[in-house]
Amino acid sequence: DQQVKQNSPSLSVQEGRISILNCDYTNSMFDYFLWYKKYPAEGPTFLISISSIKDKNEDGRFTVFLNKSAKHLSLHIVPSQPGDSAVYFCAGNSGGSNYKLTFGKGTLLTVNP
Amino acid sequence: SQTIHQWPATLVQPVGSPLSLECTVEGTSNPNLYWYRQAAGRGLQLLFYSVGIGQISSEVPQNLSASRPQDRQFILSSKKLLLSDSGFYLCAWSWTGGNQPQHFGDGTRLSIL
C-alpha cells in the first residue's frame, strides 16, 4: 500500500516560471509533511516542512500548501531556476514521532534555461 | 553546524560476502539515527532507526542488521549478502522530539554481483 503518491514522475518548466509539484497521501494519521530535493549521487536535502495544523508554509522561493480534506500537498517554486533541476520527494510522518518518514517515489523536475 | 558522513560512496560485493557500512554524525549529541534503502524505481524505505546507544528498531525484516556502538556512529551490516540487497543506502540523523526533519548523508551505492 503506497501511502504517499507522487503521480507525476517528471515535470518540465521554463526558467522564471512557477513549478508546482504535487503529492497525495492516504494515511489520515500523518500530521507532519516534508519536501526533499535530491541531486544525482547525493543524499536528499531537506527543503521545507509543514505541520497539519497549518495550510501553508513559505521559505523564500519555496511554498508548501496542505489541503487536509483532500489529503493533498503541493510544493511551489517561484521563480524556478535551472539549479532547481532535481528529483523532489514528499514525505509524511504520523503520531508526532520523528522516526518514520514515508516517502513518495519522487518527481524529476527539469528547469530549462 | 551538523554534518553526516557515510562511506564508502560505492561498493561492489559478491553474493554471500559480508557487509559493513558506516555512518557518523558530527556537531550534535544524542541524535536519532536512521538507515534507509532506495531500490531502483522505488521510494526511500526505512530499514532501521535508533534513539540511543545500543537501541535499534527494525522496520523491515531482512538480511541486514544495524548497530550503534557510539552516540554518533551507526553501522549497517550483513553476514551474507543477497542479490536483492543491491540498492542505494542512506544514513540520516534528526534531533530528538516530534516533527523534526531528517538530514541525510550522500549514500552508498551497493551492487551485488
Image (spheres, grey):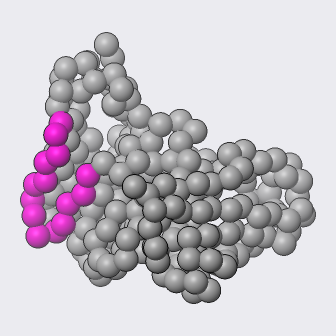
Q: Nearer the viewer, residue B39 or B57?
A: B57
Identity of the residue drawn at 33% across and 30% down: A84
Magenta range: A48-61
Identity of the residue drawn at 56% across and 77% down: B71
Measured as percent of width and height from the top left, residue B5 is found at 58, 54
The N terminus of chain B sits in image quarter: bottom left
Identity of the residue drawn at 32% across and 68% down: B100
In the image, is residue B39 above or below residue B71?
Answer: above
Residue sticking out furthest to the bottom: B55
On the question of residue B57 being in view, the answer is no
Identity of the residue drawn at 24% across and 27% down: A80
Magenta residue check for A35: no
Magenta residue check for A53: yes
Q: Nearer the viewer, residue A9 or B108?
A: B108
Measured as percent of width and height from the top left, residue B76 is found at 69, 68
**Rendering quarter of residue A49:** bottom left
In the rendered structure, the answer to whether residue A47 lies left or right of residue A67 reads right
**Rendering quarter of residue A19:** top left
On the question of residue B112 being in view, the answer is yes
Measured as percent of width and height from the top left, residue A40 is found at 53, 36
In the image, is residue A24 above or below residue B41?
Answer: below
Q: How many circles with numbers are drawn on the protein?
A: 0
Measured as percent of width and height from the top left, residue A110 is found at 37, 26
